[in-house]
Amino acid sequence: MKRVQIVGTQRSGSNLLRLVLGSLPGVFAPPSAHKLRDLQGLMPRYGSPLNSKLLVDDMARLVELNALVWPHLADRSRIVLAELQGSTLAHAVLAFYDAHARSLHKDIWVSKCLENAHFFDQIVATDLPMIWVHLVRDPRDVAHSFAKAPIGPKDPRVIALRWLRDQKAAIAARSAIREDRWFTVRYEDLVADPKTALSPLCGSLGLRWSAVALEFHRREEAHNAASLSELWNNLNRPIRRDRVSAYKRSSDIELLMAVEGIDYEIMSMFGYLPERVTAPTVISAHEENDALIRDREMRAAMAASRDPEAEAVHLRRLQFLEGLKTMSSQAVPGGSDVRAVRAESSDRVAGKTAPDQKEQ
């Protein structure tokens, strides 16, 4: 089994990359399920030694509630448990992908859970081989996309800090991985020439590039996603190159200056040159806290405008997780600690603000 983990920041074209790779023969590339992130603080529920059956059952329920559909497997939990090669959460997550890929007669799988760079140590500790793909996009375009999206951060400083922390996590992981196990793909290169951008990765996986990958938008999965939410309304179209440097059409100077200042040094490393600032911006803890408060207010205002029917689909898995959290806090002595651990995990990934558990 060949395993691929994509890391980076949301709104960077990760669903495009997932669908392109998933259109190649032998590749299983399902939607994000965020199991490694969302179950971190719930591990006391599964006991020590690990109750693998309970954990895998909960994972199975999570993907059944996913807004974007995973393939149906009869007796899913039993098949996953048969693949389990260890007793950690990361082992269970990898077994989940292994089981689905093998059941579908695929020998390569791709995980699009971008936040897994923040759980790099847990994945590496499984000793199961993994190829890492760091998808990076101009942070100004990421910010421009987040500002319009129905979910995700809205305050310019919070958006910039999220991008910065995600790239730093990926860079730190890169330093600990063999060169032939790490591939950096820029979104701009991906849309300009997908074959050239992905050829090194395909070569490492033993895949032959095929033009069929560019027909991803014709797949039922792409059409279903596009109909479900404006988050994915470009997935049922051919690759669009007009999204590159979309920030140049933005009139939100506050957004662009915040991003360029906060991300100044890291964005330059990837060839994205600041245009409005000449030095990095340092954000104090007090300023960051103010930004987070404003961000919560902006998110609440955005949430009020979302379609209730579509929102209900996105909220299903979050409600299930909240139910697990409640059961864990009641069943485990000192159960309030479960909530604290979960909050700490969320803060570490999202920068002192809860992650968007509806993002897929």
Image (spheres, helix red, strand yellow):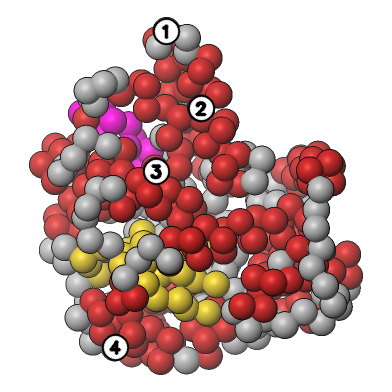
Disc 3, SS:
helix
Task: Identify the mark nearer the N-term, 3 or 2.
Answer: 3
Residue type at numbered disc 4: Ser
Give me the C-alpha separation between circle 1 and circle 2.
14 Å
- Residue 210 numbered mark, or none: 4
* Nearest to the observer: residue 163 or residue 22: 163
Mark 3 against mark 1, which lies toward the viewer? Answer: 1
Residue 31 in picture, x, y percent from top left = 40, 57
- Tag on residue 333? 1
Q: Which residue is found at the position 40% from the left and 92% from the top?
A: 196
Distance in Å between CA atoms under marks 3 and 2:
14 Å
Residue 36: numbered disc = 3
Q: Residue at the spot x=85%, y=77% of the render?
A: 278
Q: Which residue is mark 2?
A: 341
User: Residue 19's image quarter?
Assistant: bottom left
Image location (x, y in percent) of residue 318:
51, 35
Report the magenta residues as a range: 53-63
Q: Which amino acid type is marked by label 3?
A: Leu
Residue at disc 4, secondary structure: loop
